[in-house]
Image (cartoon, rainbow, N blue to C red):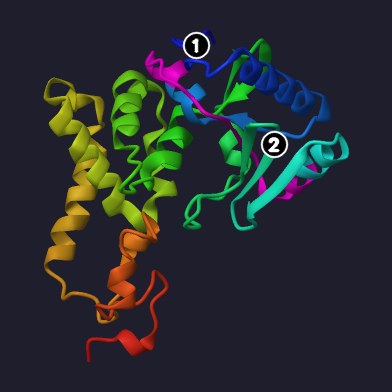
Amino acid sequence: MTPAAEPISSSPQADAFYADTLRILVELGVPFLVAGTYAVSAYTGISRPTKDLDVFCKAGDAMRILDHFRGLDYAIEIEDERWIGKIHKGEHFCDVIFASSNGTMPVGDEWFAEARRIPVCGVEVLLVAPTELVWSKAFIQLRHRYDGADVANVILRQHEHINWRQLLGYMEQHWEVLLMHLLNFRWIYPTERDRIPRWLMDELLDRLRHQLELPPPQTRICRGRMFSHIDYAIAVEQWGFADVGGDERHRLD
């Protein structure tokens, strides 16, 4: 696959760091995927600055990757053992991601099934597939960072290559988030509404119709915390809502 575009480099030194990192990963032989801005640029043709390199892998492999780079005298940081570590060399860094911060997106073998081979910084690597790219960005909805535009543009440019049933399976429990993104796409690109399969819209709207007939949940939770812990902190700290998990103390009755 030839990328439609590449990110705007911050410096030749950053490119050299990314190239060295990718070569080491390839030589290590642990399965990994390149995602983030490199994937968005490749699939949409949008070229924009990038401050880092995002590498996705399975949780068990993340520890192998980080320890390998530690042995090569790179600075290693475990930012959050639930989902992310970092590889540093001077001011440059690479994120090693194996899940989402809210726990909805563990990287598994299925992520590699439709991955595409692509040159990044002169190194042949596997690029995260459009289906998983959309999933990885669906919950990034913070005050200072919102990836909804990336979701819409990937759908526009790669709709034929998105495994829609797989995407629905990934987001089964959080189908309303998927519906929000699809409605957002329909509003942004009205002439392209048919890019989303009719069966999928029918399925999600049918779920919504049934949900509207049911009473509200009895446990008062704020799922906004799955988008942003900071932006919805007041709901938990002052307004009486439970955090994402919820508990019996927050029942309406």
At numbered mark 1, what does the secondary structure look like: helix, strand or loop? loop
Q: Residue at x 50, y 57 (%)?
A: 103
Amino acid found under the numbered disc labelled 2: His
Which quadrant would residue 91 be assigned to in this image?
A: top right
Q: Which percent across, then down, holds residue 194?
A: 19, 25
Name the foreground residue: 182 vs 52.
52
Where is residue 228? Give x, y as percent.
37, 56
Q: Which residue is mark 2?
A: 88
Q: Nearer the viewer, residue 241 or 26?
A: 241
Res. 49 visible in picture: yes
Left or right, 252 with reference to 60: left
Looking at the image, residue 66 sits to the left or right of residue 115; the answer is right
Q: From mark 2 to mark 1, how far is it between C-alphas? A: 26 Å
For marks 2 and 1, give the one nearer the viewer. 2
Q: Which residue is mark 1?
A: 3
Where, by quadrant of the figure, is residue 81 drawn?
bottom right
Q: Relative to the observer, which residue lies in front, 132 or 6?
A: 6
**Depicted 108 relative to depicted 127: above or below:** below
Asked if disc 2 and disc 1 are in contact, CB closer than 8 Å, the reply is: no
Q: Residue at x 33, y 76 (%)?
A: 237
Q: Which residues are magenta?
A: 41-64
Q: Residue at x 12, y 25 (%)?
A: 190
Does the magenta segment cover residue 240? no
